[in-house]
Amino acid sequence: MRHEPINVVYVINSLRAGGAERFLCDLVRHLDPNRFRAQVFCLYERGQFAPTVEAANVPVHVIGAKRRVVPANWMQAWRRLGGMHADIVHTHLHEATWYGIPTAYLRRVPVRVSHLQSSHWNWPRKLRWLDRAAEAFASTTLVCSATVEEFAHTGLRYPAHKLEVVPNAIDLDRFRGLPDQEGARRSLGLPQDCPILICLASITEEKGQTYLLEAMQAVHAELPEARLLLVGRDRGKADLRALVNEKGLDESVAFLGTREDVPLLLTASDVSVLPSLREGLPLSLLESAAAGLPAVATSVGGIPEVVEDGVGGILVPPRDPAALAGALLTLLRDSERRRAMGGAARERVQLNFDIRVITERIQDLYISMLAANGRRAGMVPR
């Protein structure tokens, strides 16, 4: 006898470019369609990943919430999620959890999963209270790293028994069949004879690009031909362009914004750099590792779970431009070490951060939680 698939509703702020958004996009594309039927609700807007999600026969809806915290947002979520007929609601990012998890509880959705992607020790008390209040209605909270698990338990006081560490992951297929570095640079119009650094991150204060530009000034003094590619959405929180001009780096730093050809840009580069002040478990470092790049990154959050210091890259303290510049110059001067570290980084991501493996783990978790609720246990064959 054939049984209907399990209905999973995902709620996220939007499907604009970002780590959590990319993870959700890859997750829904790899769900087993014989066992699960998915749909995505965006709080604010669709975003550039929406067509990719829809191409996998996953509908994308917009709730239309306001970007400030107002009671009308809960009412809007109640109305828009009213006809979802979900077995599971899985929320990504804080705002989606604030509105999606209580609504799912009141709508009597049997399994409610929140997904915490980062640590926010510096957030105002009111916002952390919203996190705690919403989590009370969740069946479980997935956290992307051991560091985020600690934050959820000690910083947000989530019950330990409701926390489950599930690392972020990427679709490794995106990094297969790419040209070599020379071909990638040729297709992108990048020079062949200069070292290229790449930073994949939204331009915000917490990503630490101001410290990277200070480090870049020291790198430029010794290797004036070096170039830095800044790839990511500018959220308007840090005036980096003025800083680039002030430091005389106009010819050395390129702002590329959000890009669809990230694997090609990584292939064209020599070293990945992430100077974050806070992190969960950054997909950008998983992507650069999949492309065979060594990384220079700060030893914060879940970054040490991705980059093994001295093996797949070099870790430095946050807010330390001198250490950052030293590590970058070390790798830029040593092509053999770059190759060895890049190979080790690729092997690590292939073993631990494959979206197919993580998707299977999440699917098994869904089924076990439904079974614990006495719902549909054993109904959907594997």
Image (cartoon, rainbow, N blue to C red):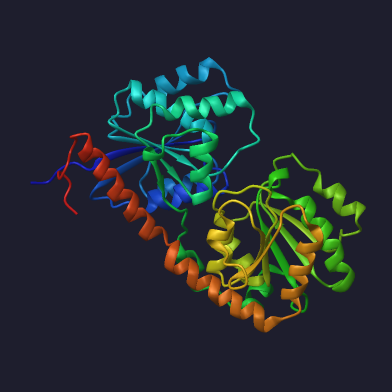
Measuring from the top left, give residue 75's x and y in whole percent. Answer: 46, 17
On screen, 20 above or below 11? below
Q: Is residue 154 visible?
A: yes
- At a point 17% along the width and 41% down the height, the residue shown is 377
Q: Residue at the location (62% across, 67% down)?
A: 266
> Could you tell me residue 330's position as x and y percent?
75, 74
State the quadrant of the C terminus: bottom left
Total of numbered circles in the picture? 0
Residue 145 seen anywhere in this rendered image of the structure: no
Does residue 62 appear left or right of residue 199 in this picture?
left
Q: Residue at x 54, y 31 (%)?
A: 44
Left or right side of 20 for 38 = left
Identify the residue at the far left of this view: 1
Asked whether 226 or 141 is in front, the reply is 141
Direction from residue 125 to residue 159 in the image, left or right: left
Question: Residue 313, percent across and down?
Answer: 63, 69
Q: Above or below — where is 339 with respect to 230? A: below
User: In which quarter of the view is residue 320 placed?
Assistant: bottom right
> Which of the 4 image quarters holds residue 251?
bottom right
357 versus 210 height, above or below:
below
> Which of 29 and 348 lies nearest the eye of the viewer?
348
Q: Is residue 374 left or right of residue 78?
A: left
Q: Position of residue 155 (x, y in %)?
A: 55, 36
